[in-house]
Image (tube, rainbow, N blue to C red):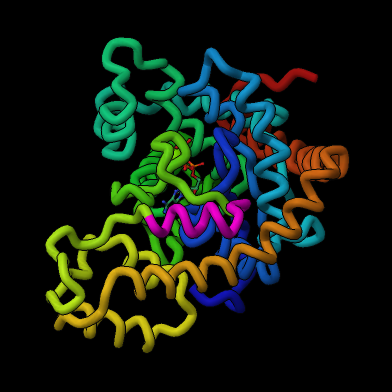
Amino acid sequence: MSTDSQPQTILTGDRPTGALHLGHYVGSLQQRVALQHHHRQFVLIADLQGLTDNGSDPAKIARNIPQVMADYLAVGLDPEKTTFCLQSALPALAELTMLYMNIVTVSRVERNPTVKNEIAQKGFSRSLPVGFMVYPISQAADITAFNATLVPVGGDQLPMIEQTNEIVHKMNSLLGKPLLHSCQALTGSTDRLPGIDGQAKMSKSLGNTLLLSASDEEICRAVHAMYTDPGHLRVSDPGKVEGNVVFSWLDAFHPDKSLVAEMKAHYQRGGLGDRLCKKELEACLIALLTPVRERRATLIAEPDYLMQTLKAGTQRAREVTQRTVDTLKRELGLPIMG
Ligand code: ATP
Ligand code: MG
């Protein structure tokens, strides 16, 4: 979607379960920075959703809120153009979640492939928190409360967008009018960045991340440990680029795409060693992250400014979201008091 098409409302966000990483950058942050100039953009820090698998550690979620705010501003999200808001301070979102929970079946919730996969990864079994099971419903509430039509997300979130649109459709049929808007996912240049350990997705809870705040040493250590092609024993051996994390990352981050294409061809026919590929990757990551890390260090030293910025945006978001819930309740024939 071009950024100069009709302005649309955007809602996207992150769980404050840790500081943000390179997966967030290519999956969503990069797009948000570009889109903020031409659209009405809300970015939600989803602390309630963060609690769905951290219920016994709310302090961890609270502590990471300013961390995520610092990441946002450090990559170039601008509070003049983007409204930042906090999920737990928007009661309309919880109210909408409760309303939607009555029109979604248990079997539908159980079918969500991302949730299924996360439940297996986290080994929840019978100790699965109810809140975790239904978090896609709360995401639908978040998106529709803002009347968002565009949602920049990573590939793992596509099932959530599908489920949101089903809820929109059901609710509109119930109301007999198209009150809620359906939305469209907008995946980034890399919709699922693999972790440094070679797992399919870099994720805070899998501990395989490279943070936006990483130092040069951390970058080099991560790249050094990175999974390549185990069959590529000698430099002269032909190597595989599929499933080779170094090449996935070069694709995601290297600005010179033709150089990466040449490197891939050379690696595949043999004669290009892992060490040189990793050097090239290190250099481009250092160039990308150094200015982000420097801006972030200044920002994180100003927690009051970060929280004030979040508070100001949350106040604006409260009006928008409450209006949606009130309209919906009125149309459903539910009483509105106060
Ligand atoms: P957690 O492990 O706590 O769920 P996470 O690393 O998955 O954390 P989220 O806050 O759940 O991060 O995701 C926020 C946004 O970033 C989502 O749109 C998600 O799709 C995107 N995202 C996260 N990780 C990646 C990744 N590795 N590649 C592309 N997009 C990603
Ligand atoms: Mg996640």
Residue drawn at the location 78% of the way across and 41% of the way down: 310
- Residue 33 x %, y %: 64, 65
Please state, as top left, top right, bottom left or bottom right, where the C terminus lies in the image: top right
Number of numbered discs = 0
Magenta-colored span: 213-224
Which residue extends farthest front? 234
Q: Quadrant of residue 143?
A: top right
Q: Is residue 133 magenta?
A: no
**Which residue is located at x 62 percent, y 67 percent?**
35
Closer to the camera, 306 or 318?
306
Magenta stretch: includes residue 215? yes
Q: Is residue 123 above or below residue 327?
A: above
Q: Which quadrant of the view contains residue 326?
A: top right
In the displayed structure image, the side of residue 304 where residue 79 appears, left or right:
left
Closer to us: 272 or 249: 272
Residue 309 image offset from top left, x and y in percent = 82, 45
Q: Is residue 217 left or right of 76 when viewed as pictured?
A: left
Residue 329: x percent and y percent? Answer: 61, 28
Residue depicted at 40% across the width and 27% down the height: 103
Nearest the eye: 101 or 197? 197
